[in-house]
Image (spheres, rainbow, N blue to C red):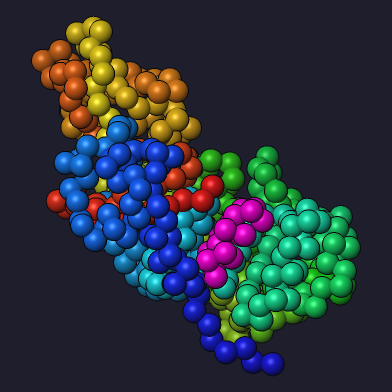
Amino acid sequence: MTVPAHPPIDHAAVRSVSERTLDWSHKGIPPAWWGRTGAEVITSAPVLFEADPFGPVCVLRDAALTHNLSTMATWCRQHGVELAPHGKTHMSPQLAARQLDAGAYAVTVATAGQAAVYRAFGVQRLILANELVDAAALRWTAAQLDADPHLEFTCWVDSVRGVELMTAALRGATRPLDVCVELGLPGGRTGCRDPRSVDEVARAVVASPRLRLVGVAGYEAALGHELTDRALAAVQDHLGALRAAALRLTPLFETDTTLVSAGGSTYFDAVAAALTDWPAGSALRTVLRSGCYLTHDHGLYARTSPLTRDGGAGLRPALEMHAQVMSRPEPESAVLTMGRRDVAFDSGLPVPLDLAGATVDRLNDQHAYLTVRPEDAPEVGAWLRFGISHPCTVFDKWRVIPVLDDDDRVTDLVHTFF
């Protein structure tokens, strides 16, 4: 049966988010907005910092988002790959809609709970880039597939035991669950470690009446984001094994086109180089799962993204933190109204954008410690801007994030669902 084309996301459901009423539970917004809907705020296009928000404040820059969406879509087309951005980065259906509208193939998630969020907004193609062995999650997935003929849902498997658990949990399901055999890096996280295991798991999937073998997958950054010769060699070895597996398993795949997926936000250039130019007649499609390109950053990905690592300006930082100086206890120090509850710290501390030579040295739950030159020291009460490193661990700290134009006027309010 041919299923008619269907929108990749329910845009009406996405728009309905703006009808939610803002209140005291949404930190970083002006109290004057409490009791108003996001749509009402957006219609009035207020200048955020003239509306007296409670600090600290996290914002997104609309021009940078638009630029990054266009840049990544163009890069993927030019390099013969597709993009299924990782939705765990922002957990925002509004931002996912912008990515899908820009040409993204699917939304990637890491857990069934994340998948449920995106299904609530009608996302039609989901890649769960992880092993799925939870019986309850598998039953939920089966129910989603059986209820919606448009839904395409793919997950990973890396063991025969995983195949057995999935098959048992899906007993009674009408549609088979699409799976990719995952390859892993030695010392990394999930994924088969050798060709023999890959082939054994693939044969088990084909033998299962509840699963369908649709491809192979990996994650080349499982050991980190270094750009050393040793790290890049490990990436190349992994991608070479992934390519070999895709070609070796071709007779076993159960769909007309085969999914070959890899690619975080650091090595996607290596993925495109290694996993394209397939043999004539093969039906292999390469899908990246990069997620952090959308907002980029001033730290980890500014250093490592293929589009900026050599001083390029292919991507622009879209996430900013604004914090106020609350104390100047010493000539070369300032304490700010921003801490671990507000900003990422797992892959680098916030980056001062207004003071040359200043550094954030450490964070407490609600405080940041800034070292400055005495002649440049900001006064108590001054507001300062900061870039971030690693957007994934900023978004999860904010339920609502204002999107601003170049004049600091609010163009949207992005809701997250962690």
In this picture, is 177 found above or below 408? Answer: below
Q: Quarter of the image holding residue 168?
A: bottom right
Image side of residue 14 versus residue 250, left or right: left
Q: Quarter of the image holding residue 242?
A: bottom right
- Magenta residues span 107-123
Is residue 114 one of those drawn in magenta?
A: yes
* x then y, percent, for residue 142: 75, 69
Q: Is residue 287 visible?
A: no
* x then y, percent, for residue 366: 40, 23
Q: Residue at x 70, y 81 (%)?
A: 255
Residue at the farthest top position: 330
Q: Residue at x 14, y 51 (%)?
A: 407
In this picture, is 209 found above or below 300? Answer: below
Choose between 147 and 73: the one closer to the eye: 147
Residue at the farthest bottom position: 1
Q: Residue at x 87, y 69 (%)?
A: 171
Q: Is residue 170 visible?
A: yes
Choose between 253 and 126: the one closer to the eye: 126
Image side of residue 59 versus residue 304, left or right: left
